[in-house]
Amino acid sequence: MSTQRKTAIVTGAASGMGRAMALGLSEAGFDVVAVDRNAAGLGTLPAPIRPLGADLAQAASFDMIVSETLKAFGRIDVLVNNAGIGQADVRPDQRSKPIRFWEVAPEQWSRFLAVNATAPIMLTRAVVPHMLKAGQGRIISVTTSLGTMVREGYLLYGSSKAAAESAMAVLSADLAGTGVTSNVLVPGGVTDTPLVGDAGDRAKMLRPEIMVPPLLWLVSDEAAAVNGRRFIAADWKTALPPAQAAEAAGAPIAWLSIARMPIEPG
């Protein structure tokens, strides 16, 4: 993007990948609004990052986030949809004792959909008109590995993240030619964040900071025309020029075979 100072919203920014991405954007010269319901975690972010408490399960939060960001900085150039909940929230040992499809309670399903699917869709819906008016903007949504979307025991997390990614694929098609883009960024493996619960040796997990190099490229001028792609941070080779790293780590958004799949109603 241009050398003029830009504004980014990062959700789920109090910890984990969201915190790493908020810090990375701030260090790169962006004004950053860090959104989370964890007030204590937000309070540990350094200035000039602006903390904003919000519960993304509440419909009123979306317009509030947009309003507060515009009030503070007068513009919205980047939205990073990172906030989410994981199945460790339901059962800490869910990786060794899968939560079977028929064990999922209706209220659990509703909550996962609200946070992992509805929130990024509705916050994007609130942000995009301002980007379209400006003729530029970047929507970057964090989903999950494609295998996780169809893995045994992952109805709650996998399916809700799949819904979000499908929506971002539709969005990228709707945005074609507008100057606003929609892409997906995933870590590419189990990442050391509070979301994973009892997932084993954290020293062997990916670090949250792995998300920063591809994110900074996606918000750069070089990526202005990149739309409808998914990038795997674990495959991003920082030793390569960014465009080459993006080629190696990227694929079409949503399902790899989407270009070969017939479009049918239902």
Image (cartoon, grey):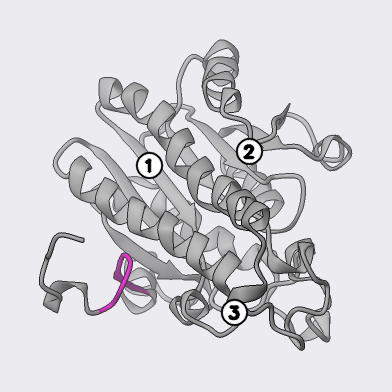
The amino acid type of the residue labelled 3 equals Gly
- Name the secondary structure under disc 3: loop
Q: Which residue is mark 1?
A: 138
Looking at the image, can residue 51 be seen? no
In the visual, does 197 lie left or right of 131? right
Q: Earlier in the sequence, mark 1 or mark 2?
A: 2
Q: Earlier in the sequence, mark 3 or mark 1?
A: 1
Other-residue count near label 1 (Cα within 10 Å), few / some / many at <14 / 14–19 / ≥20: many
The amino acid type of the residue labelled 1 equals Arg
Q: Distance between the Cα atoms at labels 3 and 2?
A: 26 Å
Dot 3 and dot 2 residues touching (CB under 8 Å): no
The amino acid type of the residue labelled 2 equals Ala
Q: Which residue is mark 2?
A: 57
Residues in magenta, as a range: 250-256
x, y percent for residue 134:
29, 22
Q: Distance between the Cα atoms at labels 3 and 1?
A: 24 Å
Q: Which residue is found at the position 49% from the left and 14% from the top?
A: 74
Q: Please tell me whether residue 1 is drawn above or below residue 246 in the rendered image.
A: above
Looking at the picture, tell me which residue is in the foreground, 265 or 193.
265
Q: Which residue is mark 3?
A: 189
